[in-house]
Image (cartoon, helix red, strand yellow):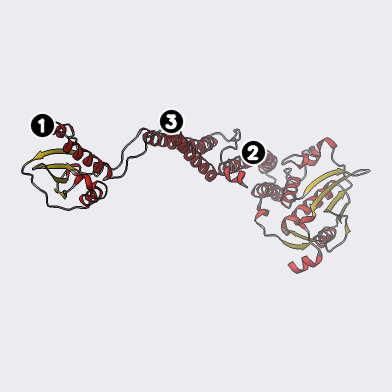
């Protein structure tokens, strides 16, 4: 089940995403282990509180003439300290100022002594907080703030490398996924475009995700069916065109002869011949029996009735078999197939015997005649469209060599098989075998009806 899932487009995309994510995480861990970044500093305001307490203690212990140099050396973008006689105290009390005052009071109360912490409302967050404390008759003024207040995050080498690799990996994997999925589609589109110009071409390779393979398989089947259909139609056109020449030539000669008393009957006979040829060819090409709905019928009763109808016309025909053989089929198509076999047997032989037998895994129908039969090496040929063995068989009125081909197509549409056998001492047996899956016990058949 999992293998089938990963063969689908969804499964392959999920695999790509999982692989790229896992690779990114592994690289990120590798970079962190290589560069070994230092632990982050304590959160604000503790670094600033330590710095203020350190400088206050330094200023108190330093001589008076060195304090100015110490204050100048301590100046940074986020920290300045100086000694003044008249400071300008700020009057704000923001949240950051309160945090810094609490940190100084709780940790460095004995060092700081008396001091005030206020917010100045400056536009620069790094120097917005003012700390004032008396020192030997003057005021020590410290301006500081949160150095990270105006910084979203700090880019480090591992983070930048991981982000860069993530972008590259996602782009590469996405490009590969698009190529993997659209590659077979591009080849399929190319084949489809070429198929519009050249009907005869090689089948497309069935590759890629399972959905693409199904499309390729359907395209190959469609191409095969279209090619076969066009070939059959070409053969029909060639065969019918060839066979129509004889009656058309005969009709022209009859009209040129000018024998009015005999022309009408002969023309009508030739017209019927041409009509039979065209009807047989159109019927073979259209495959109209596929449109017929299936239903239950008694196959034995159908065969018995057909034999009776032929016998009423004077034919020497006999049915040997039982009735009560339920068959789920297209009745008109089966009627036509058996009729074609009987008609062929009566045309080439003097007597026809139709039999039906039920075996363990199939039902067999035999149509046997006592005619000349078919040579062993030509048995497979006569089942092909437009194949007629010799001139004597070709002379049959309206025949274009489609009778057995139509029977074969109808039988195969019912999951059956047709087989031609030599009959001893002479004649031919046309055997149709249907699988038992097409039949049902009589009780089920009666229930279905």
Name the spot of residue 53 as percent of width and height, x first. 22, 42
> Which comes before the other along the chain, label 2 or label 3?
3
Q: CA distance from mark 3 to mark 1?
A: 48 Å
Pointer 2: what residue?
A: 231
Place residue 303 in its image quadrant. Answer: bottom right
Report how far apart the C-alphas of labels 1 and 2 lie in the structure. Answer: 113 Å
Q: Are marks 3 and 1 in contact (CB under 8 Å)?
A: no
What is the spatial separation of the Cα atoms under label 2 and label 3, in whole angstroms?
Answer: 71 Å
Look at the picture and state if 367 lies above or below 154. Answer: below
Mark 3, residue position: 34
Image spot of residue 239 (x, y percent): 68, 39
Residue 391: percent from left, percent from top: 79, 37
Residue 240 or residue 29, whichever sits in front: 29
Q: Residues within 10 Å of mark 2 (few under 14, many from 20)?
A: few
Q: Which residue is mark 1?
A: 65
Q: Is residue 355 left or right of residue 410?
A: right
Which is nearer the eye, 141 or 230?
141
Label 2: element kind? helix
Q: Which mark is residue 27?
A: none
Q: Name the residue: 87% across, 49% down.
A: 368
Element type where label 3 sits in the image: helix
Q: Is residue 150 visible?
A: no
Extreme right residue here?
Answer: 425
Which numbered disc, 1 or 2, marks the residue closer to the eye?
Answer: 1
């Amino acid at each position: 089940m999992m293998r089938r899932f990963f063969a689908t487009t969804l499964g392959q995309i999920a695999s790509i995403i999982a692989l790229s994510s896992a690779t990114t995480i592994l690289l990120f861990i590798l970079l962190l282990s290589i560069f070994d970044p230092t632990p982050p500093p304590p959160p604000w305001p503790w670094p600033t509180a330590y710095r203020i307490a350190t400088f206050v203690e330094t200023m108190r212990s330093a001589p008076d003439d060195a304090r100015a140099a110490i204050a100048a050396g301590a100046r940074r973008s986020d920290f300045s300290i100086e000694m003044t006689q008249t400071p300008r105290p700020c009057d704000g009390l923001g949240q950051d100022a309160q945090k810094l005052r609490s940190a100084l009071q709780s940790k460095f109360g004995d060092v700081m002594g008396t001091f005030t912490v206020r917010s100045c409302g400056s536009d620069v967050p790094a120097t917005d907080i003012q700390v004032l404390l008396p020192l030997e008759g003057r005021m020590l003024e410290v301006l500081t703030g949160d150095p990270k207040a105006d910084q979203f995050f700090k880019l480090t080498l591992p983070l930048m490398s991981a982000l860069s690799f993530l972008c590259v990996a996602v782009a590469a994997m996405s490009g590969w996924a698009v190529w993997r999925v659209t590659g077979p589609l591009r080849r399929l589109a190319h084949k489809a475009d070429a198929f519009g110009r050249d009907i005869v071409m090689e089948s497309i390779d069935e590759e890629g995700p399972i959905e693409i393979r199904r499309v390729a398989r359907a395209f190959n089947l469609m191409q095969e069916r279209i090619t076969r259909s066009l070939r059959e139609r070409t053969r029909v056109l060639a065969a019918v065109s060839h066979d129509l020449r004889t009656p058309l030539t005969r009709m022209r000669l009859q009209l040129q002869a000018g024998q009015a008393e005999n022309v009408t009957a002969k023309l009508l006979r030739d017209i019927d011949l041409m009509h039979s040829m065209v009807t047989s060819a159109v019927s073979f090409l259209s495959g109209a029996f596929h449109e017929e709905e299936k239903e239950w019928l008694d196959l034995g009763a159908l065969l018995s009735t057909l034999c009776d109808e032929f016998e009423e016309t004077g034919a020497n025909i006999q049915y040997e078999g039982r009735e009560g053989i339920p068959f789920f089929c297209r009745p008109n198509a089966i009627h036509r197939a058996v009729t074609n076999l009987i008609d062929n047997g009566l045309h080439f032989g003097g007597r026809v015997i139709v039999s039906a037998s039920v075996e363990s895994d199939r039902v067999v129908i035999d149509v046997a005649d006592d005619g000349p039969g078919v040579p062993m090496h030509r048995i497979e040929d006569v089942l092909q469209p437009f194949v007629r063995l010799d001139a004597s068989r070709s002379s049959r009125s309206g025949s274009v060599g489609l009778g057995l081909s139509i029977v074969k197509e109808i039988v195969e549409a019912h999951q059956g098989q047709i087989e031609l056998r030599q009959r001893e001492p002479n004649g031919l047996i046309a055997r149709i075998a249907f699988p038992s899956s097409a039949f049902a016990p009589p009780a089920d058949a009666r229930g279905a009806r």
